[in-house]
Amino acid sequence: AQKVTQAQTEISVVEKEDVTLDCVYETRDTTYYLFWYKQPPSGELVFLIRRNSFDEQNEISGRYSWNFQKSTSSFNFTITASQVVDSAVYFCALSEYNTGNQFYFGTGTSLTVIP
Amino acid sequence: NAGVTQTPKFRILKIGQSMTLQCTQDMNHNYMYWYRQDPGMGLKLIYYSVGAGITDKGEVPNGYNVSRSTTEDFPLRLELAAPSQTSVYFCASSYPPDRSYYSGANVLTFGAGSRLTVL
């Protein structure tokens, strides 16, 4: 079974629109970590955020915000006022404290921001 | 501080050939990983290591081997290359996880990737 599901394969938005990327995870571990990584067209993988399972505070960093809800096992990512530079593939990932720190990645959401 | 360095960046192999993808990190990370990325499939874990001398299989280990003789290096060996191994390979490293909220532990730092084509 998929531990991390990103149901949106591709999303296109017009510049300055807001967009939310969905991530649903599955774990039985009580201590786990959730991540978002960005992969721009150049191919490298860039860390965006890490969240611990015992901290459900939402986080905002500039135009980026993250909504972590344990009740729905979701860790959604919103980009406000999108820009062309936001065009990339975004991966959500899960790491479980008690399973040797293996990371489980979703299949990614490809975001295209149209100028 | 170079981070995670992978070589080569590109390689074309013939079916049945062997090769080694090199990975080295200078952050003194205990944990190292090899992932492969196929189009539309996300990243799949091939092998990982929690320290020198210790390696373990991930989701897709068949056709690959690894070793971890030092903290810095984690080479990935492809034996008898097959077209199914055509992929982009990423090496990554991290500290072990801990329960500290403010810790930067277990954030993966990735190499730039190695694109391998088997014909």
Image (cartoon, coloured by chain):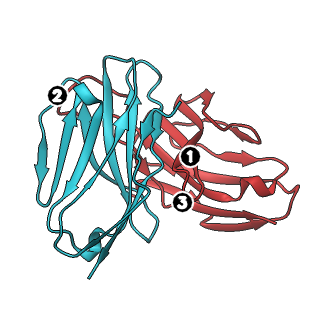
Chain colours: A cyan, B red
Q: Separation of disc 1 and disc 2 at Cα? A: 28 Å
**Element assignment for label 2:** loop
Q: Residues within 10 Å of mark 3 (few under 14, many from 20)?
A: many
Lateral position of residue A112 relative to residue A15, left or right: right
Q: Which residue is mark 2?
A: A55
Q: Quadrant of the C terminus of chain A?
A: bottom left
* Residue B35's disc number: 1
Whichever of labels 3 and 1 marks the residue nearer the N terminus, that label is 1
Q: Residues within 10 Å of mark 2 (few under 14, many from 20)?
A: few
Find out whether the residues at labels 2 and 3 contact each other: C-beta distance under 8 Å: no
Q: In the rendered structure, the residue with mark 2 lies on which chain? A: A
Q: Residues within 10 Å of mark 1 (few under 14, many from 20)?
A: many
Q: Separation of disc 3 and disc 1 at Cα? A: 9 Å
Q: Which residue is mark 3?
A: B113
Residue drawn at x 51%, y 50% is: B42
Can residue B104 be seen?
Answer: no
**Element assignment for label 3:** loop
Find out whether the residues at labels 1 and 2 contact each other: C-beta distance under 8 Å: no
Q: In the rendered structure, the residue with mark 1 lies on which chain? A: B
| Image quarter of residue A89 | bottom left
Q: Are marks 3 and 1 on the same chain?
A: yes
Q: Residue A3's x, y, as percent?
A: 46, 32
| Image quarter of residue B73 | top right
